[in-house]
Image (tube, rainbow, N blue to C red):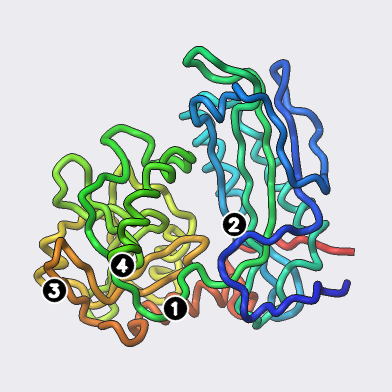
Amino acid sequence: MEKKDVDWGSLDFNYRETDYSYVSMYKDGKWDEGKLTKDHTVTMNECAGVLQYSQSCFEGLKAYTTEDGKIVCFRPDLNAQRMHDSCLRLEMPPFPVDRFVKAVEEVVKANAAWVPPYGSGATLYIRPYMFGYNPVIGVKPADEYMFRILVTPVGPYFKGGMKPVEVRIPDYDRAAPHGTGGIKAGLNYAMSLYPIMEAHRQGFNENMYLDPATRTKIEETGGANIIFIKDNGKTLVTPKSDSILPSITRRSICYLAENYLNMKVEQREIFLTEVEDGEFDEMGLCGTAAVISPVGRINDHGKVINIKSGMDDMGPTLKKLYDTLTGVQMGRIKAPEGWVHEIKVD
């Protein structure tokens, strides 16, 4: 199978149309069989539920080429389950977990020529999403839904790659207490657009949100979970909150830290004062898109909080975690059972 003629090493994190998408419709109380399509446009009524009341959710995962030339996905069953949970919270009919994984297999296989080669630094980003499709004028759930998967080759999420970024603490909340922060709803990201553009205009890479109730505890950024390293690399600490998205990457990092690197792992409330007092040696953002991106500095309304690892390079423990995670994903390190899902291409 011949790869597409793409300069893989220079890709940024943007959409590029590929050969096939996947689509399935929910109507009359059931999902149809689903199919691949070359039509990358969506046509719907002007009163569609998603256009009126933002009834939508999505997922994000990647396909990789491993060191031995296989095409694999990383823990797609967890993405399927998280989307299932998002659908329940939004009164949408969940797309079956087993069919989700099979649909991912089908669309990646059909676009195998777009999966970047091993060592290129690029990946095939997979975006499953679902939305209310039929006309809805009263405030209520839609009756019909469209589930789609698009794929697109991407490079690093942050332009600097492994270079530490600077984040700021905004005046805004990412999610309300007892709200939708714990699911991957499109409306969460719509609410974050103004704050992130404001951050960019002020020269910052991202926003670091505090808990909406007391604004004293660290939660996550607009697009990634947060991890801290302390005790000279012996301990990994990550925030615990019901309004944080349960990142698959973060959960995987915690497991690898404990079982592969013999680190202590703590998931607990983390107060901003702990960071101000220099309790942590390193700080990183983690997620499917970002993988692990180091943070060197936090700006709290003009007050600068420097992370000990600095702004020059990724800290040594985050580097170990990054190498371990990507080593598992790329087949250089033996993965825990069931983590790496091979997609066999004829």
The amino acid pointed to by label 1 is Gly
Cα separation between marks 1 and 2: 21 Å
Counting the numbered discs, the total is 4
Cα separation between marks 4 and 2: 26 Å
Q: Which residue is mark 1?
A: 160
- The x and y percentages for residue 201 are 32, 63
Q: Nearer the viewer, mark 3 or mark 4?
A: 4
Question: Observer-nearest residue: 147 or 322?
Answer: 147
Q: Which residue is mark 2?
A: 61
Q: Residues within 10 Å of mark 2 (few under 14, many from 20)?
A: many
For residue 62, what is the image quadrant?
bottom right
Cα separation between marks 2 and 3: 34 Å
Which structural element holds mark 2? Answer: strand
Tag of residue 174: none
What residue do we see at 28% from left, 65% from top? 202
Say whether disc 3 or disc 4 marks the residue closer to the N-terminus.
Answer: 4
The amino acid pointed to by label 3 is Gly
Q: Which residue is mark 4?
A: 204
Q: Is residue 325 left or right of residue 113?
A: left
Q: Quadrant of the C terminus?
A: bottom right
What residue do we see at 18% from left, 40% from top? 213
Cα separation between marks 3 and 4: 21 Å
Cα separation between marks 4 and 1: 13 Å
Q: Residues within 10 Å of mark 4 (few under 14, many from 20)?
A: some
Q: Nearer the viewer, mark 1 or mark 3?
A: 1
Q: Residues within 10 Å of mark 1 (few under 14, many from 20)?
A: few
Q: Which residue is mark 3?
A: 278
